[in-house]
Image (spheres, grey):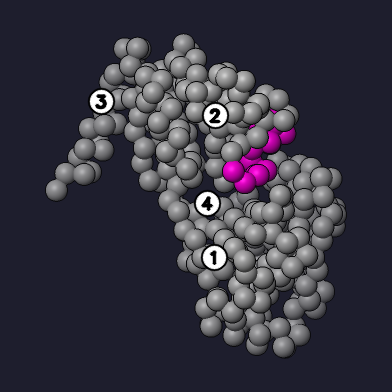
Amino acid sequence: MPVAARAAGFASPFDRATWFDLLEAYGFAGQGRIDAHGRAGGVTAWLPLRIEKPGDAAGLTNWYSFAIRPLYTGDGDRGPALRALFHNLRRTATHLTLYPVSDPDDLIAALRAAGWWVKATPAGDRHWLDLGDMGHDAWWASRPGALRSTVQRKAKKGVVDIQLLTAFDDGSWAAYEHIYAASWKPEEGHPALLRAFAEAEGAGGRLRMGIARIDGIPVAAQFWTVEAGTAFIHKLAHVEDSLKASPGTLLSAALFRHVIEIDSVKRIDFGTGNDAYKRDWMNCHDPLWRIEAFNPSRVAAWGPALKAFARSALRKAP
């Protein structure tokens, strides 16, 4: 896949060729990787996929991915190229799964136009912040009073020391891993991949990382990146017995201030998941979608398609 391929709309680290290369290098390409593509009118559409079993393809993602969406090279109308991609994919694929998808309409339309049977199901949530014309102070004034009061009270006590980094640092990353191991979170899915991603983002000047300490001991950490006016919140963790000092909340407040005032972002993406605390910081919420597509030219797709659509009909029945 060309390095220059980009998605429509805002830039994301999960659209870059290097991200998919990283997933492949760390074993997330299933039984093999396919960069599906289609060309029309000077535009080429690309979609990195993994083979789960012969005939079954899925978006090349893992649990760190915020979304999967088509990438493009060339200028012009993208619709025909995307339809050509899915038309070409019918030569090799019986079943296709794409998840997580945040903007499903163009994908659904292109799949159907290319002859696929398509089922789209809400499957998760994402929260994000649209700053519009707001600066930091206006955004902060719009946040819940309880959150603002917590930050003000805890900051005044001076118990928590905040360190913000804009470059990868071995010691800080070791502190993050120590905090994560002592946190409420389940075991990290693939820490070596996450470190490699953080190192690459640091080398590209996109990493924003925060460490909170109490009495010199790291108790909370967050890993963000910034890119083309958007900040992405990838990972956060805190040590359970430090909660009274609210180090994670203070760290979030410091990072929000930094990316808004220093990096001048206009959008902050909290990724997948409907955790209640995300609503305190964000002002937008959208569902995520799972798209399943079945190739009617292959008999092997008929049974699974019938079962999938029958389940959907039963759920809708009164």
Alpha carbon distance from label 3 to label 4: 29 Å
Frontmost of labels 4 and 1 is 1
The residue positioned 49% from the left and 61% from the top of the image is 284
The residue positioned 71% from the left and 50% from the top of the image is 228
Residue 176 shown left or right of residue 125 in the figure: right
Q: Which residue is mark 1?
A: 282
The residue positioned 25% from the left and 36% from the top of the image is 311
Q: Residues within 10 Å of mark 3 (few under 14, many from 20)?
A: few
Judging from the image, what secondary structure is the residue with disc 3 in? helix
Which numbered disc, 3 or 4, marks the residue that appears first in the sequence? Answer: 4
Q: Is residue 56 magenta?
A: no
The residue positioned 84% from the left and 45% from the top of the image is 203
Alpha carbon distance from label 2 to label 1: 31 Å
Q: Which residue is mark 2?
A: 78
Residue 122 shown left or right of residue 10 in the figure: left
- Amino acid at circle 2: Arg
Position of the N terminus, as image quadrant, is top right
Q: Is residue 10 magenta?
A: yes
Q: Which residue is mark 3?
A: 306
The x, y position of residue 3, in whole percent, is 73, 29
- One can see residue 75 in this view: yes
Which numbered disc, 2 or 3, marks the residue that appears first in the sequence? Answer: 2
Frontmost of labels 2 and 1 is 2
Secondary structure mainly formed by the magenta segment: helix
Frontmost of labels 2 and 3 is 2
Alpha carbon distance from label 3 to label 1: 39 Å
Q: Which residue is mark 4?
A: 272
Query: Hey, which quadrant is residue 269 in on the image?
Result: bottom right
The boundaries of the magenta stretch are 9-23
Q: Residues within 10 Å of mark 4 (few under 14, many from 20)?
A: many
Which numbered disc, 2 or 4, marks the residue that appears first in the sequence? Answer: 2
